Amino acid sequence: PLYTRASRWTLSTSQLFSRHFTAYGWGEVVPDGFGVAYMCGFDDALFFNCTSRAEMPMEAFVEEMERAGRDMFGLFAQVGDGKVKAKL
């Protein structure tokens, strides 16, 4: 049972970071899944490429990805402004 559950990737991700790549992609690996490629490592940007089949709720998924990105940006902005201090 564990192997069967671990063999099914509803969310498939890949990360790429290089200033030499301007285009990249990633696809879903199961019919009812999502594929997300992302590029991080820039000081001023975070790029996502989301894919799924047409019958999947892509618009809602992308809205949640955008919301999560904005939440992360807000958190890191507070850390950069000194409003939030590390607890260690």
Image (cartoon, grey):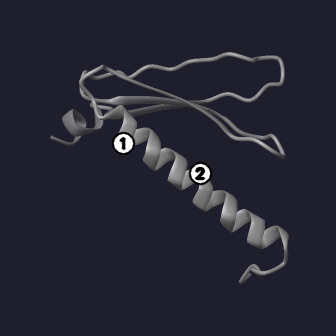
Q: Tell me if label 2 and label 1 are in contact, CB under 8 Å.
A: no
Q: Position of residue 85 (x, y in %)?
A: 77, 81
Q: Secondary structure at mark 2?
A: helix
How many numbered marks does the figure carry? Answer: 2
* Left or right, residue 62 beside residue 78: left
Q: Position of residue 48 (x, y in %)?
A: 59, 33
Say whether residue 38 is left or right of residue 36: right
Which residue: 45% across, 45% down? 63
Q: Earlier in the sequence, mark 2 or mark 1?
A: 1
Res. 59 image quadrant:
top left
Residue 1, position as x, y percentages in the image: 15, 40
Residue that label 2 marks: 69
Question: Where on the picture, by quarter, is residue 56?
Answer: top left
**Point 45% across, 39% down: residue:** 62
Decide: is 22 above or below 88.
Answer: above
Please name the amino acid that badge 1 sits on. Answer: Ala
Circle 1 SS class: helix
Task: Tell me how far mark 2 sits from mark 1, CA to CA.
Answer: 14 Å
Picture layout, residue 6 above or below residue 16: below
* 23 or 16, nearer to the observer: 23
Above or below, 63 against 56 in this view is below
Nearer mark to the viewer, of 2 and 1: 1
The residue type indicated by label 2 comes to Gly
Residue pointed to by mark 1: 60
